[in-house]
Image (cartoon, rainbow, N blue to C red):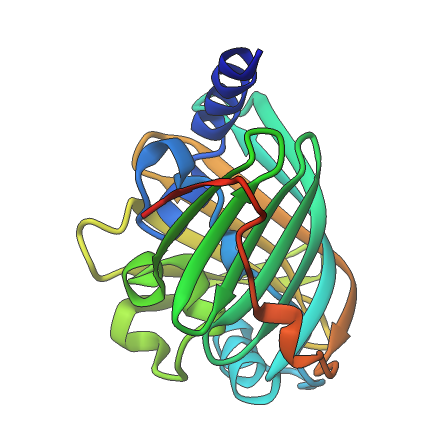
Amino acid sequence: MREGIREKREGWCRGFTLLPSLFSLPQNIMFKKTLIIFLLCASPVAHAAAIEKLKTFIAETHSAQANFTQEVLDQNGKRIQSASGIMQFQRPGKFRWTYRKPYEQLIVGDGAKFWLYDADLNQVTVKKLDAALGSSPAALLSGSNEIERGFTLAEDGNRDGLDWLQAIPRAPDSGFEKIRMAFDAQAGLAIMELNDTFGHKTVLKFSAMQRNPKFPEQQFHFTPPKGADVLE
């Protein structure tokens, strides 16, 4: 029974190449890092272009919470996986992604370590946070303010009322060819698109964003459940 669940989950994880590359983890769990990444809402900036909105977002958004949907498209644009849940983060380096569909999983960054908990498998994967983040999408939003150290940024036009930018990782082994981000008129982060080196595109869309909420200290702590397998 457990092997059947594992086979099903590994197939799902391979489809979501986003999370895997997101934190430079082994490919069978890489997809789950989305970490972390990905958060929302910046303060209003009247006519700023996307790069300016990104920098304002990072400078002024110290914590955030949002609902998210996540889709993975293959090389032909066909949807091969989808997921949804709640994302929370607190800079620097703390985040919590709760996946509710299609599988219950939890991703936590406590500032020092990265935790991935698979409820069905009762399995926990733990990594050092610095190694997990690297030059990843999560580093764009939950890392330091020095964005251009890890990414080359370029404006990418305005479409459907959103200002877009491209972020090209400077590190050749990041796992991504480019990351695109879209901001609304209020400088809120609305969409992230991650194009990996396998030709897949992962699209994250955020809604019901809360900017700078106060979280209890234990929100970003994780203790492996009793009896769980812990992989380091």
In the displayed orientation, state which residue is furthest to the right: 208
Residue at the image position 57 percent from the left and 68 percent from the top: 221
Q: In x, y percent, where is residue 127?
A: 34, 55
Q: Across the whole image, how many numbered discs are drawn on residues? A: 0
Residue situated in front as seen by the camera: 11 or 56: 11
Q: In x, y percent, where is residue 71?
A: 61, 35
Question: In which quadrant of the rendered image does the N terminus lie?
Answer: top right
Q: Is residue 153 above or below residue 21?
A: below
In the image, taking residue 54 as reference, residue 184 lies left or right, namely right
Residue at the image position 43 percent from the left and 24 percent from the top: 75
Q: Is residue 51 above or below residue 72?
A: below
Q: Is residue 113 above or below residue 185?
A: above
In the displayed orientation, state which residue is furthest to the front: 227
Q: In x, y percent, where is residue 142?
A: 48, 72
Residue at the image position 67 percent from the left and 86 percent from the top: 45
In the image, taking residue 44 as reference, residue 135 lies left or right, namely left
When asked about the image quadrant of residue 149, the answer is bottom left
When asked about the image quadrant of residue 168, the answer is bottom left
Q: In x, y percent, where is residue 96?
A: 60, 61
Residue situated in front as seen by the camera: 160 or 94: 94
In the image, taking residue 226 as reference, residue 31 lies left or right, namely left
